[in-house]
Amino acid sequence: MKRKHKRLLAVLGLVAGLGVAAALVLTAFNDNLVFFHSPSDVAEKKIAADKRFRIGGLVEAGSVKKDGLTTEFVVTDLRHAVPVVYTGMLPDLFREGQGVVANGKLDAEGRFIASEVLAKHDENYMPPEVADALKKSGQWHEKPGDHAKLKPGS
């Protein structure tokens, strides 16, 4: 075999190896990718029951029910609402009317089964995804130099 052919085979083998490695990396990345959805997105889109994603919004007033370590509450973006079930310790800052982001998946009944719940860390912070979802729903306004707030009467 000529020297030229040996080099060509080596280059082709290297390119094939890089292609396989890139495919494996992209597959692993896709398996760990978690998308954010608002309650309106969940209501409008058909999300598979076993697909992991994040949901965010406000904890609806009067919706929190605790039974031992299991907590049921409703997350809303003021247009749609999704019931959430979480078993475990909630963050200290978790309360009704506050922003929350939960990781998990929908069950067959349309409830969101959360594996993790994240709450805001101070009175001026709203998770960016939650704020964007509320802005899309038309329930959020922001004045220059002022912190974003819910519209009066919302």
Image (spheres, rainbow, N blue to C red):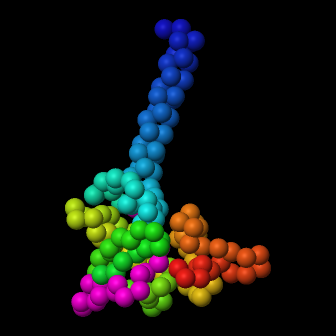
Mainly helix, strand or loop, the magenta region? strand
Of residue 81 and residue 25, the one placed in the foreground of this image is: 81
Q: Is residue 108 magenta?
A: no
At a point 28% along the width and 69% down the height, the residue shown is 111
Location of residue 131 by image quarter: bottom right
Estimate the x, y position of residue 58 in percent, counting from the top left.
Answer: 47, 78
Q: As drawn, is 114 to the left or to the right of 37?
A: left
Estimate the x, y position of residue 65 in percent, counting from the top left.
Answer: 29, 88
Check the image and report above or below for 59 versus 66.
above
Q: Does residue 139 appear in the picture of this structure?
A: yes
User: Which span is picked out in magenta?
Assistant: 53-71
At a point 35% along the width and 84% down the height, the residue shown is 63
At a point 48% along the width and 40% down the height, the residue shown is 22
Of residue 86 and residue 96, the one placed in the foreground of this image is: 96
Residue at far top of view: 2
Of residue 89 and residue 4, the one placed in the foreground of this image is: 89
Q: As drawn, is 30 to the left or to the right of 66?
A: right
Q: Does residue 89 appear in the picture of this structure?
A: no
Check the image and report above or below for 125 versus 45.
below
Q: As drawn, is 28 to the left or to the right of 11?
A: left
Q: Is residue 56 magenta?
A: yes
Estimate the x, y position of residue 34 in percent, counting from the top left.
Answer: 43, 59
Estimate the x, y position of residue 92 in percent, counting from the top left.
Answer: 45, 91
- Count of numbered marks: 0
At a point 30% along the width and 54% down the height, the residue shown is 48
Residue at far right of view: 145
Check the image and report above or below for 96 versus 80.
below
